[in-house]
Image: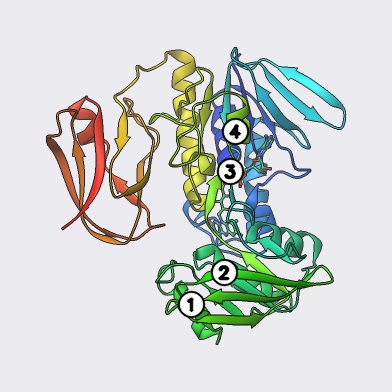
């Protein structure tokens, strides 16, 4: 019987576990937390589950369903086990309080999720006070432990997850006092981007944070310049850093997998195969954040590709290169019978043409797009596969 190790028991890992176990594969799921469920476990709010169960569920209820389905199918879930490294032969080192353990599965799936950029990664200036945290940590503190470390926070960023942060802070009795967006426009789609105004929350765009002012180790105020270059101050005892997700790729990096400089996740082909012959990847480990339902679908699709691979590996397809106008593209290589959708993100808001050029610079495909950063762009893979050659993708204004 083939054996697959899945790293990470979030929606992608749990969905893959169910598919693989139902196909008769021995599945071990290693999760570093003490509970399975991934990010949704820290989300007391909805909406989760529409794509999967045709129901709107809270994150916790959704996670519970995915866990039940994976374990009922026969997957073994090992909690509080962190995968520390995968060697060149595919041998895996698991760490836990009990010490180190080695496994030698036939294939490995990285479903390690994504996290928001930290304070250090955002190069925030000023003091290092308490009360500065990401939405992920905020949700974890409030929904799992019932506490938040501030009463008057400021929200930095305006992605969908920022709206989630606003609601969580209000629920925790700490209504935000301002929303600061570094860009010129709010990022979340309507109607979600109307939420701050609807709640009477002051919104500042084009913001550059210039100082975090602390006293006795606690945040007291934020200094920033606004879109017109005016210096402003807001009194606040907390700062929630929202969005700017990047894949949790520590394990992939430590294990010597090729990392895509644009997505910051492992480079993959359209089957989810990484540069390591035994390692696949799915879910937010591939790129910044998508919804749980999207990651769940990716987990299932990559699991099916793994089942095919165990029987008879498919050949490699041509590479996709990134050209001007695009922030990232995933996957970075085509493959027959693709499991993943070809997703792209623009570097800036644009109305224009998405262009695929061959190695000689000839235009082989175009698609009209109107988009903004953080908006998902999907490019049909079949016409690109039919061209059967390396292509460079770019986004050009009309
Ligand atoms: C604040 C917030 C609110 C959100 N709200 C919604 C919403 O309302 N609706 C929605 O659809 N989506 C929502 N999302 C997005 C959703 O949570 C994610 O899309 C989804 O959880 C991604 O699934 P995943 O399996 O790829 O990763 P994750 O859910 O992040 O799971 C990854 C798992 O891998 C584990 N792991 C990582 N490294 C290792 C290792 N080395 N060894 C062992 N285990 C490891 C982690 O502990 C984690 O449990 C929200 C996200 C955030 C941050």
Image side of residue 382 versus residue 312, left or right: left
The reply to whether the C-beta atoms of the residues labelled 4 and 1 are less than 8 Å apart is: no
The reply to whether the C-beta atoms of the residues labelled 4 and 2 are less than 8 Å apart is: no
Is residue 52 among what the camera can see?
no
Q: Which quadrant of the rendered structure holds the N terminus? A: top right
Q: Residues within 10 Å of mark 4 (few under 14, many from 20)?
A: many
x then y, percent, for residue 305: 44, 26
Q: Which residue is mark 1?
A: 226
Nearer-N-terminus badge (2/3): 3
x then y, percent, for residue 297: 47, 43
Nearer-N-terminus badge (4/3): 4
Q: Is residue 52 above or below residue 301?
A: below
Nearer-N-terminus badge (3/1): 3
Front tag of 2 and 3 = 2
Inter-mark Cα distance, 4 to 1 = 48 Å
Task: Give me the disc on residue 17.
Answer: 4
Q: Which residue is mark 3?
A: 113
Outermost residue, bottom side: 200
x then y, percent, for residue 21: 59, 28
Inter-mark Cα distance, 2 to 3 = 28 Å
Q: Residues within 10 Å of mark 3 (few under 14, many from 20)?
A: many
Image side of residue 263 versus residue 343, left or right: right
Q: Which quadrant of the rendered structure holds the C terminus? A: bottom left
Find numbered disc 4 in the image and state the secondary structure of the residue it sits on. helix
Q: Which corner quadrant of the image does residue 125 belong to?
A: bottom right
Task: Give me the disc on residue 209.
Answer: 2
Inter-mark Cα distance, 4 to 2 = 43 Å
| Disc 3 residue lies near ligand 1 with CB under 8 A | yes
């Amino acid at each position: 019987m083939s054996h697959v190790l899945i790293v990470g028991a979030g929606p992608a890992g749990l969905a893959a576990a169910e598919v693989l176990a139902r196909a008769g594969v021995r599945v071990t799921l290693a999760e570093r937390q003490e509970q399975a469920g991934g990010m949704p476990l820290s989300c007391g709010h909805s909406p989760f589950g529409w794509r999967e169960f045709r129901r709107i569920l809270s994150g916790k209820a959704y996670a519970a369903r995915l866990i039940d389905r994976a374990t009922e199918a026969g997957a073994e879930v090992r909690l509080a086990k962190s995968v520390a490294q995968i060697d060149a032969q595919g041998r895996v080192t698991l760490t836990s309080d009990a010490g180190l353990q080695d496994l030698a599965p036939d294939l490995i799936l990285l479903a390690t999720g994504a996290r928001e950029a930290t304070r250090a990664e955002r190069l925030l200036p000023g003091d290092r006070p308490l009360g500065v945290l990401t939405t992920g940590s905020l949700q974890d503190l409030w929904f799992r432990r019932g506490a938040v470390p501030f009463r008057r926070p400021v929200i930095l960023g305006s992605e969908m997850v920022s709206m989630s942060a606003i609601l969580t802070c209000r629920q925790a009795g700490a209504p935000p006092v301002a929303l600061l967006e570094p860009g010129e426009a709010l990022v979340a789609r309507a109607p979600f981007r109307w939420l701050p105004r609807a709640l009477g929350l002051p919104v500042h765009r084009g913001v550059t944070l210039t100082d975090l002012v602390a006293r006795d180790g606690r945040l007291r105020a934020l200094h920033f310049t606004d879109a017109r270059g005016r210096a402003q101050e807001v009194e606040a005892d907390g700062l929630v850093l929202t969005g700017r997700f990047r894949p949790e790729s520590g394990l992939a990096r430590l294990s010597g997998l090729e990392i895509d400089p644009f997505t910051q996740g492992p480079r993959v082909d359209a089957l989810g195969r990484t540069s390591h012959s035994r390692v696949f990847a799915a879910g937010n480990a591939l790129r910044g954040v998508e919804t749980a339902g999207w990651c769940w679908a990716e987990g299932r699709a990559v699991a099916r590709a793994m089942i095919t691979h165990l029987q008879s590996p498919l050949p490699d397809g041509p590479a996709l290169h990134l050209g001007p106008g695009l922030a990232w593209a995933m996957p970075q290589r085509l493959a027959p019978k693709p499991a993943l959708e070809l997703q792209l993100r623009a570097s800036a808001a644009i109305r224009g043409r998405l262009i695929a050029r061959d190695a000689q610079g000839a235009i082989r495909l175009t698609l009209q797009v109107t988009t903004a950063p953080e908006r998902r762009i999907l490019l049909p893979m079949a016409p690109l596969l039919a061209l059967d050659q390396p292509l460079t993708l770019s986004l050009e204004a009309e």
